[in-house]
Image (spheres, helix red, strand yellow):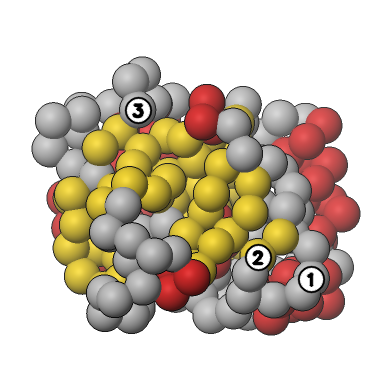
């Protein structure tokens, strides 16, 4: 059972559809009452960092999610902006993030190595998983995913980097700390690679 947090951002139906094809049951969690019998959580998101945090706070689900993730150690997978809000802060806004993984979200435009490249970083890109990352089981030598973003997660500690991709420089495109996982790319748009990653998250 996968609970998908529906706080007003992200294409929830795309995840429901992909998991249905995989034969894995999902539940939309739109209220605190929906967060029952949770075994896995997906935290999607698109758009701006501050807006995502404002909507999550307004949903009333932030505190119970923190209980589930930080105290009960329920595995959670943040996707796109859902990954970025796992960080402590972002150059895109002024608010604070969840801080579940120590790091900051940075701008590609502010990095000399990527400033001259087209923005946003959009399209398919190769991904190099870190050794032993359970999200990328079976994808170690063949991982390619769809990206659409102008900001990237910069881990404070390299040990929390679960995968890297190149856009003028090597950046963290997947993160991991204990039961908290995040990916910058869109697995729901990444064909069989995305399906394999979502299946891994449901099963490990």
Q: Residue at x 18, y 63 (%)?
A: 124
Mark positioned earlier in the residue sequence (1 or 2): 2
Callout 1 crowding tier (Cα within 10 Å): few <14, some 14–19, many ≥20: some
Is residue 44 found left or right of 11 in the rendered image?
A: right
Closer to viewer: mark 3 or mark 2: 2
Residue 154 seen anywhere in this rendered image of the structure: yes
Is residue 55 found left or right of 112 in the rendered image?
A: right
Q: Secondary structure at mark 2?
A: strand
Callout 2 crowding tier (Cα within 10 Å): few <14, some 14–19, many ≥20: many
Mark positioned earlier in the residue sequence (1 or 3): 1
Q: CA distance from mark 1 to mark 3?
A: 30 Å
On screen, residue 57 above or below 20: below
Which disc number belongs to residue 95? Answer: 1
Q: CA distance from mark 3 to mark 2?
A: 24 Å
Which residue matches tag 3? 130
Which of the two residues, 174 or 153, is positioned nearer the viewer here? 153
Residue 135 figure quarter: top left
Mark positioned earlier in the residue sequence (3 or 2): 2
Circles 1 and 2, Cβ within 8 Å, touching? The answer is yes
Q: Position of residue 103 (x, y in %)?
A: 64, 46
Q: Secondary structure at mark 3?
A: loop
Which disc number belongs to residue 69? Answer: none
Which residue matches tag 2? 90
Residue 72 figure quarter: top right
Q: Position of residue 178 (x, y in %)?
A: 62, 26
């Amino acid at each position: 059972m996968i609970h998908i947090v529906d706080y007003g951002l992200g294409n929830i139906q795309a995840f429901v559809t992909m998991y249905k094809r995989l034969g894995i049951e999902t539940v939309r969690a739109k209220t605190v009452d929906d967060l029952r019998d949770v075994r896995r959580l997906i935290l999607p998101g698109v758009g701006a960092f501050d807006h995502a945090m404002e909507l999550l706070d307004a949903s009333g689900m932030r505190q119970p999610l923190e209980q589930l993730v930080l105290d009960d150690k329920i595995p959670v997978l943040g996707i796109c902006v859902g990954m970025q809000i796992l960080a402590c802060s972002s150059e895109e806004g002024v608010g604070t993030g969840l801080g579940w993984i120590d790091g900051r979200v940075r701008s590609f435009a502010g990095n000399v190595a990527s400033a001259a490249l087209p923005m946003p970083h959009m399209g398919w890109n190769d991904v190099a998983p870190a050794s032993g990352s359970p999200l990328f089981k079976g994808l170690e030598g063949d991982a390619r995913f769809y990206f659409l973003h102008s900001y990237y997660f910069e881990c404070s500690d390299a040990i929390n980097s679960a995968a890297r991709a190149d856009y003028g420089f090597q950046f963290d495109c997947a993160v991991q700390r204990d039961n908290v996982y995040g990916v910058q790319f869109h697995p729901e748009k990444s064909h069989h690679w995305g399906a394999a990653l979502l299946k891994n998250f449901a099963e490990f």
